[in-house]
Image: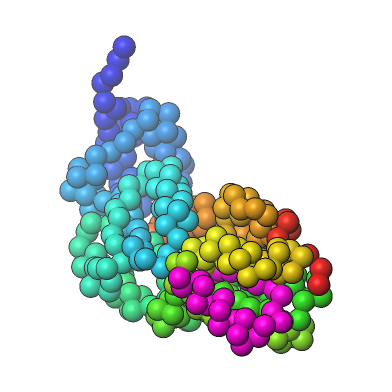
Amino acid sequence: MNTRMVTIADVARAAGVSTSTVSYTLSGKRPVSTETRRRVERSVRELGYHPHAGARALAGRRSHVLALAVPLRTDVYVPIMMEIATSVAVAARKRNYDVLLITNDEGSDGIRRLAASDLAEGVILMDVELDDRRIPTLGKLQAALIGLPGNPRGLSCVDHDFEAAGMLCADHLADLGHRDVAFVGYAPGTYQRHAGYAERTLAGFRARSKERGLRFLHRPCEGTYEGTAGALGRILSDRPETTGFVVQNEGAIGPLLSLLRTSGRTVPEDASVIAMCPDRLAEQYTPALTAVTGSATELGRIAVEQVVSRIATSMRGEQPADEVVLLSPTLTIRESTGPH
């Protein structure tokens, strides 16, 4: 069995060009014709050529590395964050990029150091805030955001349409005849730091509730059993006739269902519950939860496409185009919602 590593010379022979032309094609250091580029790229694919990151950086001043800023917070749902990160890694590998993970505790200083180095050609920011302090530190570093800041001008962003998700929840409860509803959200700190996904969902729910004549309460929640008990206690104390509940905080779902049962309210006969969570989580509960969902995998894939496109455009000496992609949410009706 031949296990010899494929070299740049092998690629050059297969493509019928010089090794320097292969290097220029892969690095983008000098322009090559479209036909030559296609021949080189075809040979790279057919031979399975994988240039070493260190050699690429020295020869072509390209690292073929994307940085991914991953949130490590107690108020984020880790399985979804890891699903997005895995999707980024898989999509990047298909584009011949490796992924460097940086954590959000490095904040804007970490992005500034990254922009000043040659470690990565681009970065993908997760857990985007409406006034995200990392954005001004990007400099010339090409970036894609998984999340929508307050001002997306000059950026490429992909996110779930959280405002539409909030509206879907309000419409579903209104269509079922509910008039007094409650929104069980994330911990107070999530709103204090203006996390886009939290504020946009709440804004959509609030606006559509007003349109549909719903009276609603918003109660932040830590997501623990004690925190959920406190939030539900405040809801029922302020509005005891509440019959519809929307839960965006994944940690509060189980406690809320349990607390509703112990308070004598049967789901969905006495109280309807909509969760904003992955389908696999919604289906674990009894009763199975009506849920609003979106694809975490698509977020990662599109973000990689966006940042790679920006890198390629920039290397051609052109200005990358702004792009905002919002993925439409899906409402799946199950057993936890019913007419009132």
Residue 8: image location, x then y, percent? 27, 33
Q: Quadrant of the N terminus?
A: top left
Q: In which quadrant of the rendered view does residue 26 lie?
A: top left
227 inside magenta stretch = yes
Q: In which quadrant of the rendered view does residue 290 lie?
A: bottom right
Q: Residue at x 29, y 62 (%)?
A: 103
Using the image, determine if residue 38 lies above or below residue 143: above
78 inside magenta stretch = no
Residue situated in front as seen by the camera: 253 or 315: 253
Using the image, determine if residue 112 lies above or below residue 123: below
In this view of the protein, can residue 55 be seen by the observer? yes
Residue that lies at the very extreme toward the top in this rendered image: 1
Q: Residue at x 69, y 79 (%)?
A: 242
Q: How many marks?
A: 0
In the visual, does 46 lie left or right of 60?
right
Residue 140: image location, x then y, percent? 31, 70
Q: Residue at x 42, y 52 (%)?
A: 82
Using the image, determine if residue 162 lies above or below residue 234: above
Residue situated in front as seen by the camera: 82 or 309: 82
Task: Name the image colouring.
Answer: rainbow
Using the image, determine if residue 150 lies above or below residue 2: below
Residue situated in front as seen by the camera: 235 or 177: 235
Residue 180: image location, x then y, percent? 72, 82
Q: Residue at x 63, y 78 (%)?
A: 182
Q: Quadrant of the C terminus?
A: bottom right
Residue 57: image location, x then y, percent? 21, 49
In the visual, does 228 lie left or right of 100?
right
Residue situated in front as seen by the camera: 117 or 86: 86
In this view of the protein, can residue 309 be seen by the observer? no
In the visual, does 93 lie left or right of 240?
left
Tell me where the magenta segment starts and ends, as one range.
Answer: 226-248
